[in-house]
Image: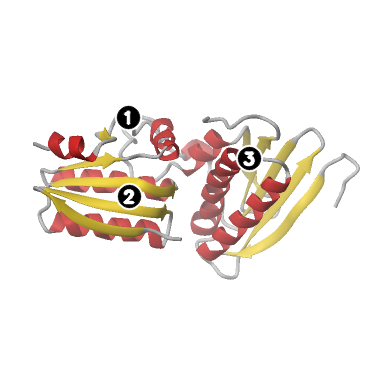
Amino acid sequence: MSVKLNNRQVGDVTVLDVSGRITLGEGSSALRDALRDLAAKGNKKILLNLSDVTYIDSSGIGELVSGFTTVANQGGDLKLLGLTKRVKDLLQITKLYTVFDVHEDEAHAVRSFA
Amino acid sequence: METDTGSKEVLDHHYPSTLESVDQAESEILAAAGQAGFDEDGQHEIGMAVRECLVNAVVHGNRYNRNKRVHVKVRVEQVARFTIQITDEGEGFEMTEVPDPLHETNLLRHSGRGLFLMGAFMDDMKVQKAPAGGTEVTLVKLIGRGAMLA
């Protein structure tokens, strides 16, 4: 299974639910397009829900970083929600875990944008 | 094929330079890893490393050239080593010129983490020029060790 993306609005926060595999090709380009689209539409508070992401490779990590910098450059925030142990491990060994604002609880994450 | 050194070759295949081949080769390597006794975490770590290596071979080594192949060999050695050798037909590169992805100035780079991840998920990694040109990467996972990141 490749990646599935769905965005929803919680107050003024846009939550992008991601599920499946984020790997080079269809998965990473779908995530890139979705994040660029949200940023282009002026969304400045984006919460990326990765709780159903089963696999992410270095290309996927690259898209997370690019999304983070794209949104930040437009004066917004991109935060992460619901990392599985494997994704958390990956962000830790690449020293990116502390770069992102990571949350486990959606309500708490939404409030953190205020 | 069993060799006189006690290692058994469980996979020897050439793949075209496509992303579909990456999926196929990863799947075949993971099947061999399962047969060699690796649990789910061990297979995940091998999968992470070989996917990065295969993508590098297809994208950076062979540059999606359909006339070039990626050669994958997997051996299970009697000394409990699961060895994967992945060779492309590209122009090669210098390891010393690869930026450190953990350096603070590189942390927010879009790419450049593949080689680092291969080393992180495997017990040993060697990158060298292949005898016929291209890059030959040897990845080793010790059989019977717990998952490195567990």
Where residue B98 appears, as percent x and y from the top left, is 46, 39
Q: Residue at x 23, y 40 (%)?
A: A106
Q: Distance of mark 3 from mark 2, alpha carbons?
A: 29 Å
How packed mark 2 is, by other alpha carbons closer than 10 Å (few <14, some 14-19, many 20 or more), is many
Q: Is residue B34 left or right of residue A52?
A: right
Q: Secondary structure at mark 2?
A: helix
In terms of secondary structure, where does tag 3 sit? loop
Residue type of the residue flagged with mark 2: Glu
Give the residue number, with chain letter if any, for mark 2.
A63
Q: Position of residue B63 (x, y in %)?
A: 50, 61
Asked if badge 3 and badge 2 are on a common chain, one would say no
How many neighbours does mark 3 have within 10 angstroms: few (below 14), some (14-19), or many (20 or more)? some
Residue B18 shows up from this direction: no
Q: Residue lying farthest bottom?
A: B67
Q: Residue type at mark 3: give it.
A: Asp
Q: Nearer the viewer, residue B62 or A64?
A: A64
**Are the residues under marks 2 and 1 on the same chain?**
no
Q: Disc 3 is attached to a residue of which chain?
A: B
Determine the CA span between mark 2 and mark 1: 18 Å
Q: Which residue is mark 1?
A: B104
Q: Residue at x 57, y 38 (%)?
A: B41
Q: Chain of mark 2?
A: A
Counting from the top left corner in percent of width and height, residue A107 is at: 19, 38
Q: Residues within 10 Å of mark 1 (few under 14, many from 20)?
A: few
Mark 3–mark 1 Cα distance, whole angstroms, equals 34 Å
Q: Which residue is mark 3?
A: B39
Q: Residue at x 36, y 54 (%)?
A: A19
Same chain? Circles 3 and 1: yes
- Judge left or right: residue A11 versus residue A21: left
Q: In the rendered view, does B71 fall on the left or right side of A53?
A: right
Mark nearer the viewer, 3 or 1 = 3
* Disc 3 versus disc 2: nearer the observer: 3
